[in-house]
Amino acid sequence: MLWSDENMPRPDSSASSLNRLLSDAIPQRKKLEEIYSLLPLTQCLRRTRCCSFLPEMTWLEAQPILDQIVRKEAARRKGLVEKIIRYFFINPVEIVGCPFLEERDCSIYVDRAFGCRAYGLWSPEYYRDLVDKSIEGKKAVQQAWERLGVVLPESVLNFRPPYCNQVNSEAGLADEALESSYQDIVILSQETSGHPFFVEECFGDFSFFVAQWIYGPREAVQLKYQIVRDIVLKNSRERLESALKNIADPFISW
């Protein structure tokens, strides 16, 4: 079972149950597209500076990304799923880049999350504040790992994606307007039945969602702890590579 809270919907771990959740959110997804259409048109120069991480997102933002994955040819989808799972396991100890990054291109660009769309549109001052808050928020994660006997690298904890001043836009947008657009997306996502699980159980982490779908929620967390511990304390990636072998395609029956 993917869901643990008694007040949350409880689909079984099947394609049909997830498809049902996706179908229930069609009206909200249309409104999401409308919000995206109001953002300034940009021309990305493909410097990939914003692709250091897989951005946090809402359940509503995750849905078109899921659709893209499902539509990919089986071999490409398998490789992408492996990249997503690798990212999930080692992102606490290494800046590996977004799993959707292919060389200097984004494989889901038309369906990218708001965090990607807003990068380069924020003012430099507002962006620095966002990064500061992100680093501050990592302290709780750092302390949780330390209680488990694992000290995460400072280079990862304090990593700052550089501000991008090379996004070409036909029209500017104030920080307040961008923030308002994001809040509209959050409100829309809260109207969908899958939002509580995705935010509260997966913390808005798409890679965590996929890992739970493949391994199960408890198993995914336990395996991540073991892999990170091996990398930090033993400099060993044997368990990581073993976990990545023969990953079942969770989307093959869609």
Image: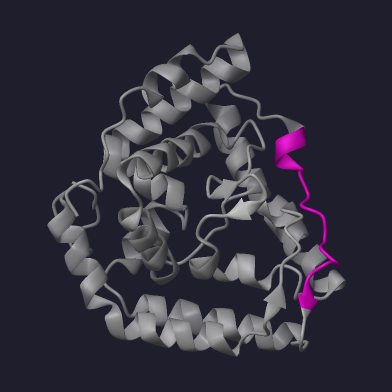
Could you tell me which residue is drawn at 38 percent across and 28 percent down?
Answer: 222
Could you tell me which residue is drawn at 63 percent across and 85 percent down?
Answer: 39
What percent of the width, then of the height, locates residue 181? 58, 84
Give the colour scheme shown: one colour
Task: Give the extent of the magenta segment.
Answer: 155-168
In the rendered view, tell whether residue 178 sits above or below residue 54.
below
In the rendered view, tell whether residue 12 sits above or below residue 177.
above
* Residue 28 is inside the magenta segment: no
In the rendered view, tell whether residue 42 sits above or below residue 17.
below
What percent of the width, then of the height, locates residue 194? 29, 66
Could you tell me which residue is drawn at 17 percent across and 54 percent down?
Answer: 15
* Residue 156 is inside the magenta segment: yes
Magenta: main secondary structure: loop
Comparing 99 with 127, the one in front is: 99
Task: Say whether residue 209 is left or right of residue 143.
Answer: left
Is residue 19 at all visible to an observer of this figure? yes
What percent of the width, then of the height, locates residue 182? 57, 79
Which quadrant of the view contains residue 233? Answer: top right
